[in-house]
Image (cartoon, rainbow, N blue to C red):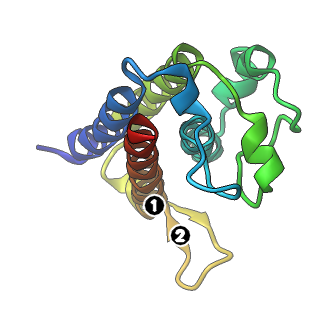
Amino acid sequence: MNHAEVLVDAFERVKGVVHDTLDDIPEHALTFRADSEANTVAWLIWHLTRVQDDHVAGVAGSEQVWTADGWSDRFALPFDDGAIGYGQSSDDVAAVTSSADLLRDYHDAVHAKTVAYVQSLSVEDLDRVVDDNWDPPVTLGVRLVSVVSDDLQHAGQAAYVRGLADRA
């Protein structure tokens, strides 16, 4: 297994949890909140996909799928096109009421772009510094692993919230 295969496998795992969480989800479960401040399945899936889209486009030097392919218009959320969910309020979380199909389709589009990008990388590319605002500076490899880690955590949270909603 080479570097690209390892990274693709990691992003495939994110996609698998996203699909498992959204498959046959009752509509009410998408916006279920364990309490008034809790994140919803819809927001968590939207957020993890926005983070992946934003971060991968940033290191690839490309436009985000969100704007390039019209996903921002399809979701019609009351946020700036650059919003990825970081620091959003409880009211912002409640504003994400998208369907499971829309969330899944956006995630799949971002996943496809991510996989294509990762498969284009050489081993040497992973050592390229992509953010020198940290000590030590962040390399491309570290950034991609960070995205996988963040996405898996949020995907797990979404699966947990769906489980709570299924029992409510």
Q: CA distance from mark 1 to mark 2?
A: 10 Å
In the image, residue 40 lies at what x, y percent? 59, 43
The single residue placed furthest to the bottom in the displayed view is 135
| Rendering quarter of residue 141 | bottom left
Residue at which label 1 appears: 146
In the image, residue 110 lies at what x, y percent? 52, 28
Q: Nearer the viewer, residue 139 or 22?
A: 22
Tag 2 secondary structure: strand
Quadrant location, the N terminus? top left
Q: Amino acid at mark 2?
A: Val
In the image, residue 23 lies at what x, y percent? 37, 20
| Residues at marks 1 and 2 touching, judged by CB atoms closer than 8 Å | yes
Q: Residues within 10 Å of mark 1 (few under 14, many from 20)?
A: some
Q: Residues within 10 Å of mark 2 (few under 14, many from 20)?
A: some
The single residue placed furthest to the front in the displayed view is 168
Q: Amino acid at mark 1?
A: Ser
Label drawn at residue 29:
none
State which tag comes first along the sequence, 1 or 2: 2
Q: Residue at x 62, y 43 (%)?
A: 47
Left or right of residue 127: residue 13: left
Q: Nearer the viewer, residue 97 or 129?
A: 97
Identify whether 134 is placed above or below 48: below
Residue at which label 2 appears: 138
| Rendering quarter of residue 75 | top right
In the image, residue 131 lies at what x, y percent? 63, 66
